[in-house]
């Protein structure tokens, strides 16, 4: 007969449901991990941008004392926000700061999120 083996029995499909459930579960877990790591990266980027904003404001508030003092204050504020200053530059009365935050993950390797900010007096434009 059609569909019978040499011994006269039909082949068994026992266990195929388990394989399908495991495969779908694996896909769901992998998609969840990808979403989690993407979320961690977005949060780290926001933290880096906020730290850069605060550091630039601190530097701009101290620009009259010189670049070394202003950038030192920027580094202190960035560290208080869990970031490190990558670059700090004073141009006239404007402070330009770049800050980085480490992205926490269990994946091997070191990932950082970077935020950049500028602070200074409002531009006096033609009104």
Image (tube, rainbow, N blue to C red):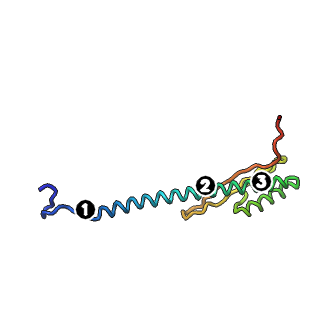
Disc marking residue 13: 1
Q: Look at mark 3 in the image and give the residue it sits on.
A: 56
Q: Report the side of 94 relative to 101 (left or right).
A: right
Report how far apart the C-alphas of labels 1 and 2 lie in the structure. Answer: 45 Å
Q: In which quarter of the image is the C terminus?
A: top right
Q: Give the residue drawn at x 81%, y 55%.
A: 59
Residue 12, image x, y percentages: 22, 63
Residue 50, image x, y percentages: 70, 55
Report how far apart the C-alphas of labels 1 and 3 lie in the structure. Answer: 66 Å
Q: What element carries label 1?
A: loop
Disc marking residue 90: none
Q: Report the side of 36 relative to 116 (left or right).
A: left
Which of the marked residues, 1 or 3, is nearer the chain's N terminus? Answer: 1
Which of the marked residues, 3 or 2, is nearer the chain's N terminus? Answer: 2
Q: What element carries label 2?
A: helix
Q: Look at mark 2 in the image and give the residue it sits on.
A: 42
Which of the pair 39/65 is nearer the observer? Answer: 39
* Mark 1 touches mark 2? (CB < 8 Å): no
Which of the pair 52/107 is nearer the observer? Answer: 52
Q: Give the residue drawn at x 54%, y 59%.
A: 36
């Amino acid at each position: 007969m059609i569909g019978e083996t040499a011994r006269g029995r039909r082949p068994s499909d026992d266990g195929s449901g388990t394989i399908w459930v495991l495969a779908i579960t694996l896909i769901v877990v992998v998609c969840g991990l990808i979403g989690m790591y993407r979320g961690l990266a977005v949060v780290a980027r926001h933290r880096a941008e906020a730290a850069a904003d605060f550091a630039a404001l601190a530097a701009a508030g101290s620009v009259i004392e010189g670049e070394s003092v202003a950038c030192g204050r920027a580094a202190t504020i960035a560290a208080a926000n869990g970031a490190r200053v990558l670059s700090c530059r004073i141009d006239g009365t404007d402070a330009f700061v770049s800050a980085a935050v480490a992205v926490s993950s269990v994946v091997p390797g070191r990932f950082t999120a970077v935020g950049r900010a500028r602070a200074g007096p409002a531009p006096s434009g033609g009104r």
